[in-house]
Image: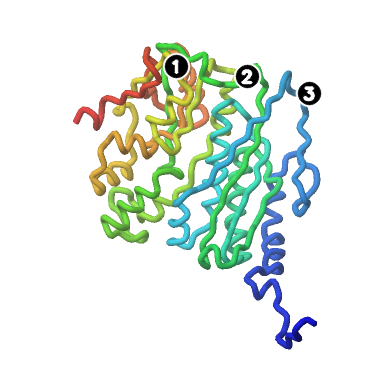
Amino acid sequence: MAENNSKQGLTYAQAGVNIDAGNKAVELMKQHVRATYRPEVIGDIGGFGGMFALNWKNYQRPVLVSGTDGVGTKLYLAFMLDRHDTIGQDAVAMCVNDILVQGAEPLFFLDYLAVGTLQPEKVAAIVSGVARACRESGCALIGGETAEMAGFYPDGEYDIAGFAVGVVDQPKIITGDRIRTGDVLVGLPSSGLHSNGFSLARKICFERQGKKPADIIPELGRSLGEELLTPTRLYPKVILPLLGKFDIRGMVHITGGGFYDNIPRVLPKDCGVEIDAAAWPMPAIFSLLQNWGGVAWPEMYRTFNMGIGYMIILPAQEADNLQQALRQQGEASYVIGTVVAGEQQVTIRGGVFDA
């Protein structure tokens, strides 16, 4: 016979999961999510699955391209500053910029947010950043998951990841296999560190230098925390209008691994690149990190984007017209290197490498 337990029965909320708070968060984020919808979206927020009716007639052989990524330890900056309305853009940018490399137009996005204690207003702020970035990238936020994991994450902390799906016509996929010696690399500026290298940046700034996020850094003209938390740039609106107008043979999203590890991902086996480090202005944050941490310059270019967040590889004779098209968008660009014969090696010269 079962033992009679006179204690009051437990609830899910007492175990640390507040369903009512989750429902409130959904209500707070609805307006942001709906503002991202494209005409192809079917249904509304709250369904078991997000639906998107792609018009296949616009493509000869449509190919779906997917990508997933997170924000990494940049999240600690959001926690330290208690600012959560921009970190969602980082999650979106890391995904849509990746699939853009193959020429894909971002169609829709899903997010995954795991929290220790669900605070509806904070969740809504995070999702508002996701939604704003989706609108700027032209993709719909058609679904997501907010998981309250009591006891797993400390109160006030969370993790976020994203999932993007885009489409490209198979004949127009950009793979890098047409890259040839003599082609040039045109670089587009980053907005700062983007979402990579933060484990090293935090160690340099807060452990070795003992700085605080609120410290005003004269070389930056603002606080260190503001600089580091600057959201990752979104490149789809800049790049998509160029596709089909130029013979773009390869593109590179400079993420973890910097120049040395990302550029070879698109190079044919018989090609390398030579980069001129003096071809673009290096943002102050990178020289500060190098100086404060005593980091060797090759390590800097293997860890950070060094002021170039995205690269386009195309024939040299098209570079001027490409840059003119970018200027018409109000976009700065720099011819930063050349494709040479090699074995996918990246050689960086000039600038700090000649000092």
For image coordinates 70% across by 65% down, the residue present is 24
Q: Position of residue 283 (x, y in %)?
A: 34, 40
Disc 3 packing (10 Å; few <14; some 14–19; many ≥20): few
Q: Quadrant of the N terminus?
A: bottom right
Identified by mark 1, the residue type is Lys
Identified by mark 3, the residue type is Lys
Q: Which mark is residue 57?
A: 3
Q: Position of residue 304 (x, y in %)?
A: 37, 39
Q: Vertically, is 217 above or below 13?
A: above
Q: Which of labels 3 and 1 is toward the front?
A: 1
Mark pair 3, 1: CA separation: 36 Å
Q: Which of labels 1 and 2 is toward the front?
A: 1
Kindly check if marks 2 and 3 are in contact, taking CB atoms under 8 A apart as contact: no
For image coordinates 63% across by 49% down, the residue present is 111
Q: Quadrant of residue 240?
A: top right
Secondary-structure class at tag 2: helix
Number of residue marks? 3
Disc 1 packing (10 Å; few <14; some 14–19; many ≥20): some
Disc 1 or 2, which lies upstream in sequence? 2
Secondary-structure class at tag 1: loop
Q: Which residue is mark 1?
A: 269
Q: Which residue is mark 2?
A: 172
For image coordinates 28% across by 42% down, the residue present is 287
Q: Position of residue 11 (x, y in %)?
A: 71, 75
Mark pair 2, 3: CA separation: 16 Å
